[in-house]
């Protein structure tokens, strides 16, 4: 029947390996007979593939259970996927902290680590703190560095496909930084760099507040909000990686910056001074009229920015995260105003992962990369159009 | 080799048919030997498939060329795809006109038609004018109604997946109209209904100003602008079909409507009064200070709306269409302001298709539907994940 079977035998071997791995990963353990049934492959093919996967360290035979052996004579050999055959890292590089999360090949979390960084720290210092955080984490988890199969890293700013930061005003010395290249010096495995709001969107979809929706916008609420979006379950980066960078919207035809909006003194706040912002919100809660007015101005701005995203993208769900999410009074006005102005208002919910979202999403990107290598079959065997 | 070959034989027949049709459609004519070479299928398979396609009327044998026959003895039979085996319609239902474009199965245009409609016409009258336009067009082209394989229809407003208009304030009696159902009464083939800015985006990508980009936003500029976008070459409808409906953006924190912005009398213009708008632009060109100020206000609003789309989506190209596109002075300020405020400014270009864009894009959607039925192979044969 032509190309579909007559083609490249190594491609077919890869496909069969992927199919078997996928089946094994979906079960605790499986016998050759079970794999044959699940995959639809022939017994000799399954035997050959499992042999190869054991050689590559990705599959191992598990000891037979005693009871089963007694009752039924020689028991069938059972195999399992070795999730511990490799490891993944998700990294967050933020204005105030660096953080890392470690997992096995199933994405199961094995440990986390973080370090505070001053918002004025130069790039080298920030990356050194990240290096120390990773070294600590690997040592504590007893994982060798060369066991890492992929690393995902999240950074503020617009990140190019090769991991260069095109624009990153939140961190000193960040614009133009070849972040991917720098990180690749520390790791022998593939390193994927992505915008922080984008990874947070991925994380909330993976194991956060939006596991039930494939069309979501994640808003990293702050003085200069950023956003990431998933469309049909896939991260929407934009043509130049700049999708969701709505922070510039207030520059258009609006007189005041968010820093001025939240000020109660007339002096604008520092863009990254979360402490000051938290105080303004606290004062508002205590009934301070000036602070309440400032919070109201701030929320109105946030509503406008989110509404622009919602009108452009029409997501099913908007997840609000970032430091502003922990503060009272953001969610309800957002819901109310979006219901007023959007033709089809989305659900508005809080981040479930909190500050873990950014590194968790970076981990998920690393996992996606490895899964594509190990398990990807979809799209490989298709006729040409 | 398992599922990929051992599976459903009718699926394999369909795939082989699609592969052969695709090969034939890409060539003027082809012999069985040529099809065998292009597709990688066996000779008997190709013979069987071509036989079946001839039976279905999709392929026909072409007469041998005399010269070839003389020189080489009995010439090989040649076959071609019958693009005339079916027809497609693209429809535009607008505030001021209804229009239709007819094509064959290759998407080659065979004729167009249009009729003026009053903006206050009720839904029944508008649909009756559309019916007459289609009947005229089919008669002039000599195409039988039952030769239609699919119809695409473009409408203002938010259109649900089943073709119901969820919200359509531009046309009287439009909100809630079961437009898809109404149109399906007139046609025996599948009818696809889509938002007009969305079809225009599809058209500019197909054969207009943005054939070289897969990431574009089309702005249907007007008093209440709408937009359609393609992401990675695919139409982005949004979760509820409302993506790009940025007309409501001005309601947020902005005091005046576009109708007031463009007014030079203090009285707002009628939202659909294109004549009055054109006059304001003309007066501005003639140096009228009041009109110039009005145009400037209008452009500032348009820039803001487009900027919101660009920041949210990060397209490579923005195509400006709709009636405002023909008017001077929109393009340059848009480019200048987007360059100032967008982190990665897109190219901004004018629509190449003008008022034909909407119906042309509707035709393309009909063509996509038929191609998916006749030629779709990609994604059909994949292992399960």
Image (cartoon, coloured by chain):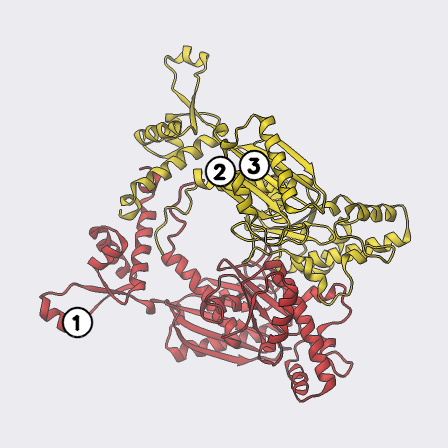
Chain colours: A yellow, B red
Distance in Å between CA atoms under marks 1 and 2: 63 Å
Q: Is residue B228 visible?
A: yes
**Which quadrant would residue B225 be assigned to in this image?**
bottom right
Residue A332 x %, y %: 77, 50
In front of the other: B80 or A280? A280
Q: Is residue B196 left or right of residue B59?
A: right
Disc number at residue B216? none
- Report the residue at 43% width, 62% height from top: B368
Dot in front, 2 or 3: 2
Q: Residues within 10 Å of mark 2 (few under 14, many from 20)?
A: some
Foreground: A76 or B156?
Answer: A76
Tag 1 secondary structure = loop
Query: Do the residues at discs 1 and 3 belong to one chain?
Result: no
- The label on residue B65 is 1
Apparent side of residue A373 relative to residue A137 in the rendered image (left or right): left
Subunit bearing disc 1: B
Give the farthest residue toward the top. Answer: A70
In this image, B52 relative to B177: left or right?
A: left
Judging from the image, what secondary structure is the residue with disc 2 in?
loop
Task: Let me know if residue B166 appears in the view.
Answer: no
**CB within 8 Å, label 1 to label 2:** no
Q: Which residue is mark 2?
A: A188
Q: Which residue is at 74% across, 63% downward?
A: B252
- Residue B263 in picture, x, y percent from top left: 73, 80
Q: Secondary structure at mark 3?
A: strand
Using a 10 Å C-alpha cutoff, classify the residue at mark 3 as few (fewer than 14 neighbours), some (14 to 19) or many (20 or more). Answer: many
| Mark seen at residue A89 | 3
């Amino acid at each position: 029947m032509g190309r579909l079977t007559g083609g490249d035998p190594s491609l077919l071997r890869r496909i069969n390996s992927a199919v078997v791995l996928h089946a094994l990963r979906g079960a605790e353990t499986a016998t050759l007979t079970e794999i044959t049934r699940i995959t639809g492959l022939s017994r000799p093919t399954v035997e050959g593939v499992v042999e190869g996967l054991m050689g590559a360290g990705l599959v191992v035979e598990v000891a037979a259970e005693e009871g089963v052996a007694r009752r039924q004579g020689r028991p069938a050999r059972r195999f399992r996927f070795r999730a511990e055959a490799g490891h993944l890292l998700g990294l967050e590089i933020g204005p105030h902290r660096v953080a890392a999360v470690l997992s096995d090949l199933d994405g199961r979390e094995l440990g986390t680590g973080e370090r505070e960084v001053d918002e004025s720290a130069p790039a080298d210092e920030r990356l050194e703190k990240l290096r120390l955080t990773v070294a600590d984490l690997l040592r504590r988890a007893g994982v060798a560095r060369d066991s890492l199969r992929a690393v995902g890293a999240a950074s503020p700013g617009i990140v190019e496909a090769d991991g260069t930061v095109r624009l990153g005003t939140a961190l000193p010395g960040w614009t133009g930084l070849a972040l991917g290249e720098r990180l690749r010096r520390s790791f022998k495995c593939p390193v994927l760099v992505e915008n922080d709001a984008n990874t947070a969107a991925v994380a909330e979809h993976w194991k956060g507040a939006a596991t039930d929706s494939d069309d979501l916008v994640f808003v990293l609420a702050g003085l200069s909000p950023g956003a990431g979006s998933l469309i049909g379950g896939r991260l929407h980066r934009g043509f130049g990686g700049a999708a969701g960078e709505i922070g510039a919207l207030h520059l258009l035809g609006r007189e005041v910056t968010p820093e001025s909006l939240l000020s109660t003194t007339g002096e604008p706040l520092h863009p990254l001074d979360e402490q000051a912002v938290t105080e303004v919100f606290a004062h508002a809660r205590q009934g301070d009229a000036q602070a309440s007015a400032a919070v109201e101005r701030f929320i109105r701005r946030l509503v406008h920015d989110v509404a622009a995203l919602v009108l452009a993208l029409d997501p099913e769900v908007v997840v609000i995260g970032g430091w502003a999410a922990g503060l009272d009074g953001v969610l309800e006005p957002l819901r109310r105003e979006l219901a007023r102005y959007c033709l089809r208002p989305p659900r508005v919910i809080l981040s479930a992962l909190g500050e873990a979202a950014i590194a968790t999403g970076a981990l998920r990107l690393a996992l996606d990369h490895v899964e594509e290598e190990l398990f990807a079959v979809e799209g490989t065997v298709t006729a040409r159009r």
